[in-house]
């Protein structure tokens, strides 16, 4: 069974600085998707960024980028120019190609200090 | 475009009771899945419905059951509630089955269930 591990329960960063959230996963599959979701206090999960395993190029969405290391099974999220609105729980998630379910990590609580 | 909506937002039940949670999928989405998120944990997959049939289930007992209706809305039913069922229950929808798209799920804000 696939597993996702987020080793940082909490992280904090100064506003406008850069922060990196870590995620590792375990799978024997070669085709899969990886995601970072943000869950603010409103509780709604919001997709931040997505990476297809067959793509070597790291995904980027504005201030958010990933460092995808397939051989190491690592998928970290970098947030540049942190803003107060970035404060939330961040979840790393995995899905097999053709599978129904997302497998989530335990989350990292990100605090932005003004 | 209307997003995923869930009801009720909060509810309190006692052990042994039954509960029904409701979800309206995002417009155009025919696949709905349910997740249980215990406090301080990541969501856990309960099951998925596609065109009114369950087509995937996580490691949850049979007292967790569901329905999907012709308009693609869905219900999650939990019988014989236990204290450990206290959690946030998230509904998510997507257009089509997993293999037909890149897998993005659109989540609702969840229903917070407390079992006393």
Image (cartoon, coloured by chain):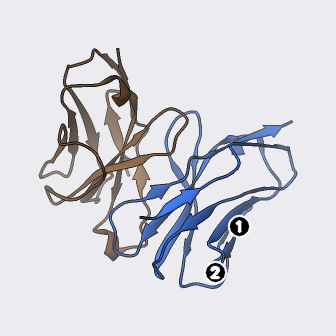
Chain colours: A blue, B brown
In percent of width and height, residue B63 lies at 18, 37
The image quadrant where one finds the N terminus of chain A is bottom left
| Both labels 1 and 2 in a single chain | yes
**Residue at x 65% of width, y 69% of height:** A74
Is B53 located above or below residue B62 in the figure? below
Q: Is residue B39 above or below residue A5?
A: above
Q: Which residue is mark 2?
A: A71
User: Where residue B80 sits: x, y (%)?
Assistant: 19, 26
Does residue A2 appear left or right of residue A68 in this picture?
left
- Between B70 and A52, the residue placed more toward the observer is A52
Image quarter for residue A57?
Answer: bottom right
Mark 1 — on which chain does it sit? A
Say few, some or many: other residues with alpha carbon within 10 Å of mark 1 (under 14 / 14 to 19 / 20 or more). some
According to the image, label 1 marks what residue?
Answer: A65
Badge 2 sits on which subunit?
Answer: A
Q: Classify mark 1: helix, strand or loop.
A: strand
The reply to whether dot 1 and dot 2 touch (C-beta < 8 Å) is: no
């Amino acid at each position: 069974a696939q597993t996702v591990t987020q080793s940082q329960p909490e992280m904090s960063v100064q506003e406008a600085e850069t922060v990196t959230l870590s995620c590792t996963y375990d799978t024997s599959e070669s085709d899969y998707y990886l995601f970072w979701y943000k869950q603010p206090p409103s509780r709604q999960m919001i997709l931040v960024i997505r990476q297809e395993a067959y793509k070597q190029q790291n995904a980027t969405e504005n201030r958010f980028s990933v460092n995808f290391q397939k051989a190491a099974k690592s998928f970290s999220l970098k947030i540049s120019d942190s803003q107060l609105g970035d404060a939330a729980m961040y979840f790393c998630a995995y899905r097999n190609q053709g599978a129904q379910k997302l497998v989530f990590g335990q989350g990292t609580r990100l605090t932005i200090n003004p | 475009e209307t997003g995923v909506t869930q009801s009720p937002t909060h509810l309190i039940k006692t052990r042994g009771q039954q509960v029904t949670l409701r979800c309206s999928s995002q417009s155009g989405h025919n696949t709905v899945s349910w997740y249980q998120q215990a406090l301080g944990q990541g969501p856990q997959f309960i099951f998925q419905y596609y065109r009114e049939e369950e087509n995937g289930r996580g490691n949850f007992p049979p007292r967790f059951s569901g329905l999907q209706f012709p308009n693609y809305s869905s219900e999650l039913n939990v019988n014989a509630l236990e204290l450990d069922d206290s959690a946030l229950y998230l509904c998510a929808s997507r257009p089509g089955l997993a293999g037909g798209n890149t897998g993005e799920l659109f989540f609702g804000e969840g229903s917070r269930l407390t079992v006393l």
